[in-house]
Image (cartoon, helix red, strand yellow):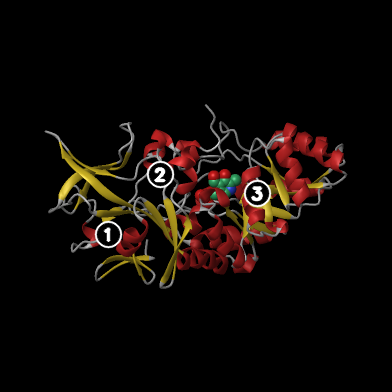
């Protein structure tokens, strides 16, 4: 959030006023600060420097090509979970030797493309997936490097939909099953078990889940080594949290202080998969108030952005700070229902669902129709989770770089909505 500043004339990112961007490209639109996401990447790298990690940006957080290209130029690798994400990574010239392929349901055509591209590692989540990778690799006459994703049954204290390291989750392999799988892998010629992977959930705002997961993983690595496995990689996943305005989280230094000593002790190359930490607070969603509506009990600000543009509040009940782009009130007056001034409103979209909201019962300055609002912390899992629900064209995306800005994805048109359909 600190990358977006209120100056005279309203909210700006780097040297560009967001009112100016909205007048030029219309709303709703996503706006990202390049300086913001590059500085997040550097902050993580600096904190973890002692372990010299391979930082694989998790493309699912925001896979817009211009953003991925800028991160690649800055030296990031990529964490992918589908053939489509592989396509995007290769499109922006990512070095396949920096790509890790995760996900529970890789199909054979996806595996084949990734092998053809020579990605660094497949993070394997089941015995049948290992067999499928072996089958495809053997048909192609190559050997696939794999890391087993373990499920340490650790509670990451996230929303239940984004917890991935508990035994009831579909992710990862339980330790005794992983032991058996290591036995199975001995009989498979086309896979090379090169490491282990953990991803516990997202966002994880304390270090304890990482410590608990690694506390179980490290002895397992030793055991695997004593059974002849040449373990070279330890992947600690992503999940590094950001501040949304209603929470507190540790920062890169605290994550590193917990993880680096254990990674070094493992004697493995450290891989990390941050997504949200890099891009979450580097983006805002700009939206205009279409109508103000008052019922006998409530006030609504009905905006031109909706749940199809940013689904996190509807999906997870996520908090996003919202504030007018032009305001004379101090920003820290936000969201105190017991505070004074302004009004309490539900900030909602035009979609035909009561779940279509960005904030409920939020204190905002008095609004007028046409006012521009910024929905903060929208850089991660915003546009990538967008849809065309209610046949709404998806918004455009703008990248700010110093005093310059450019459209990095044009707004969809009605023709885009029906592309590929026949009747
Ligand atoms: C395997 C894996 N790695 C990394 C991430 C990125 O998480 P975050 O954006 O919270 O860093 C995810 C998110 O779902 C994931 O599933």
Check residue 134 in the rendering and tell me which mark sits there, or answer none: none
Q: Is residue 212 visible?
A: no
Residue at label 2?
Answer: 309
| Label 1: which secondary element | loop
| 178 relative to 67 in the view: left or right | right
Q: CA distance from mark 1 to mark 2?
A: 19 Å
Q: Residues within 10 Å of mark 1 (few under 14, many from 20)?
A: many
Q: Relative to 128, does residue 244 appear above or below in the rendering?
A: below
Image disc number at residue 325: 1
Question: In terms of secondary structure, where does tag 3 sit?
Answer: helix
Question: Would the CB of label 1 be found within 8 Å of ligand 1?
Answer: no
User: Label 3, on which residue?
Assistant: 87
Quadrant holding the N terminus: bottom left
In the rendered image, residue 354, in percent from the top left (x then y), is placed at: 30, 32
Residue at point 18%, 54% (across, down): 365
Mark earlier in primary sequence (2, 3): 3
In percent of the image, x 55 and y 41: which residue is there? 154
Label tally: 3
Q: Specify whether 309 is left or right of 361.
A: right
Residue density around tag 2, few if under 14, some if 14–19, many if 20 or more, within 10 Å: many
Residue 235: percent from left, percent from top: 65, 52
The picture quadrant where one finds residue 187 is top right
Rate crowding at label 3 as few (under 14), some (14 to 19) or many (20 or more) other CA atoms within 10 Å: some
* Structural distance between the alpha carbons of marks 2 and 3: 23 Å
The answer, for residue 406, to whether it is visible in the render is: yes
């Amino acid at each position: 959030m600190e990358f977006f500043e209120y100056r005279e004339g309203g909210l700006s990112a780097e040297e560009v006023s967001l009112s100016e961007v909205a007048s030029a490209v219309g709303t709703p639109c996503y706006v990202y600060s390049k300086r913001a996401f590059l500085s997040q990447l550097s902050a993580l790298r600096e904190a973890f420097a002692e372990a010299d990690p391979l930082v694989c940006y998790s493309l699912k957080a925001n896979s817009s090509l211009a953003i991925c290209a800028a991160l690649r130029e800055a030296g990031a690798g990529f964490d992918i979970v589908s053939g489509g994400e592989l396509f995007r990574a290769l499109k922006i010239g990512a070095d396949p030797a920096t790509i890790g392929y995760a996900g529970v349901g890789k199909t054979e055509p996806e595996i084949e493309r990734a092998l053809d591209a020579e990605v660094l590692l497949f993070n394997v989540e089941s015995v049948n997936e290992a067999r499928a990778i072996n089958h495809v690799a053997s048909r192609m006459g190559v050997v696939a490097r794999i890391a087993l994703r373990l499920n340490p049954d650790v509670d990451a204290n996230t929303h239940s939909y984004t917890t991935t390291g508990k035994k009831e989750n579909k992710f990862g392999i339980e330790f005794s099953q992983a032991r058996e799988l290591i036995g199975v892998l001995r009989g498979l010629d086309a896979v090379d078990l090169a490491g282990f992977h953990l991803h516990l959930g997202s966002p994880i705002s304390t270090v304890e889940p990482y410590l608990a997961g690694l506390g179980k993983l490290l002895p397992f690595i030793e055991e695997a080594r004593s059974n002849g496995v040449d373990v070279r990689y330890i992947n600690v996943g992503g999940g590094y949290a950001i501040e949304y305005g209603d929470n507190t989280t540790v920062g890169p230094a605290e994550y590193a202080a917990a993880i680096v000593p254990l990674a070094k002790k493992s004697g493995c190359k450290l891989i990390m998969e941050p997504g949200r930490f890099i891009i979450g607070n580097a983006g805002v969603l700009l939206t205009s108030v279409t109508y103000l509506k008052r019922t006998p009990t409530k006030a609504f600000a009905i905006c031109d952005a909706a749940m199809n543009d940013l689904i996190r509040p509807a999906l997870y009940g996520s908090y996003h700070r919202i504030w007018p782009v032009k305001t004379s009130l101090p920003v820290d007056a936000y969201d105190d229902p017991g505070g004074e001034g302004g009004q309490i409103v539900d900030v909602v979209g035009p979609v035909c669902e009561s779940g279509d909201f960005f904030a409920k019962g939020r204190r905002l300055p008095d609004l007028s129709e046409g006012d521009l609002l910024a929905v903060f912390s929208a850089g991660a899992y915003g546009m990538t989770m967008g849809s065309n629900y209610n046949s709404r064209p998806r918004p455009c995306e703008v990248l700010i770089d110093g005093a310059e800005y450019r459209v990095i994805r044009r707004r969809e048109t009605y023709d885009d909505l029906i592309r590929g359909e026949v009747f």
